[in-house]
Amino acid sequence: MSIPTPATLTSLEAIAAAVHDCTACPLAAGRLTAVPGDGNPHSPVLFVGEGPGQKEDETGHPFIGAAGKFLDEMLSAIGQTRSDVFVTNVVKCRPPENRDPEPDEIHTCTDLFLWKQIEFIAPKLIVTLGRHSMGLFFPPEYKISQIHGQPKRVRGRVVLPLYHPAAALYNGGMRQTLIYDFKKIPLVLKKVQLTP
Ligand code: URA
């Protein structure tokens, strides 16, 4: 168990190994398995969720519970599968009782891992799932209810903020909105890929 040194994180595999070993924040103490993220490391689209839930904590893979099934359905609707894209989270360890991650946990984890993952994957499009992920790229006064589905260039990358599949799963209106926004992904990606 250790706090990784950024200089040792020289590949996605090294990051994943360091995530499994990490004790840099209090979330490490409560996890069964850390969840580095997985999928296609060459994907032009990177999905960033919030943090592992119970099923993810048990298995070490992101989005495999009910929210994950919904994510798979939406991916299928745009002709993609999980192995086409890369999926990770803001924090890599399950917060106790699925509470929101604390700002210092988010800061520690993203500084160590997420920004490096983004550097290695170099996605054309980052799709944020939920407000914690969105909060990494947009100012705090931005509300997800106002900016969902609107792609924006941030820190040199195009970011599409979407509702979190778990929040939208059982809320009819939000579910339809998320499905509608999700279907914009191919078009946004096409536009990004055409823009130098
Ligand atoms: N919710 C998330 O944000 N991430 C997961 O991996 C699972 C559920």
Image: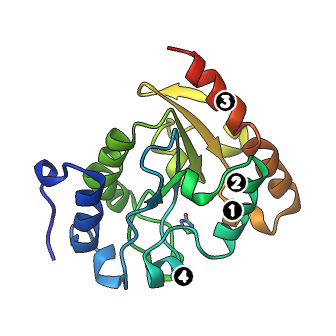
Residue 189, quarter of picture: top right
Question: Which x, y percent locates residue 115?
Answer: 33, 44
Q: Under tag 4, what secondary structure?
A: helix
Determine if the C-beta at disc 4 is less than 8 A from ligand 1: yes
The vertical placement of 35 against 57, above or below, is above
> Does 154 appear above or below 35?
above
Question: Would residue 6 appear left or right of 194 to someone viewing this image?
Answer: left
The residue located at (51%, 36%) in the rendering is 138
- Distance, label 1 to label 2, CA atoms, is 5 Å
**SS at mark 2 in the image:** helix
Distance, label 4 to label 1, CA atoms, is: 16 Å
- Which residue position holds label 3? 188
Q: CA distance from mark 3 to mark 2?
A: 15 Å
The residue carrying pointer 4 sits among few (fewer than 14), some (14 to 19) or many (20 or more) residues within 10 Å by Cα, namely some
Q: Residues within 10 Å of mark 1 (few under 14, many from 20)?
A: some
Q: Going 46% across and 37% down the picture, which residue do you hit?
A: 123
Residue pointed to by mark 2? 75
Q: Is residue 189 left or right of residue 17?
A: right
Q: Which residue is tagged 4?
A: 55
Tell me whether the residue at label 1 lies in contact with that at label 2, contact meaning CB atoms closer than 8 angstroms: yes
Choose the circle earlier in sequence order: 4 or 1: 4
Pinpoint residue 57: horizontal percent, then vertical percent.
45, 80
> How far is disc 3 from disc 1 in space, using C-alphas?
19 Å
Number of numbered discs visible in the structure rendering: 4
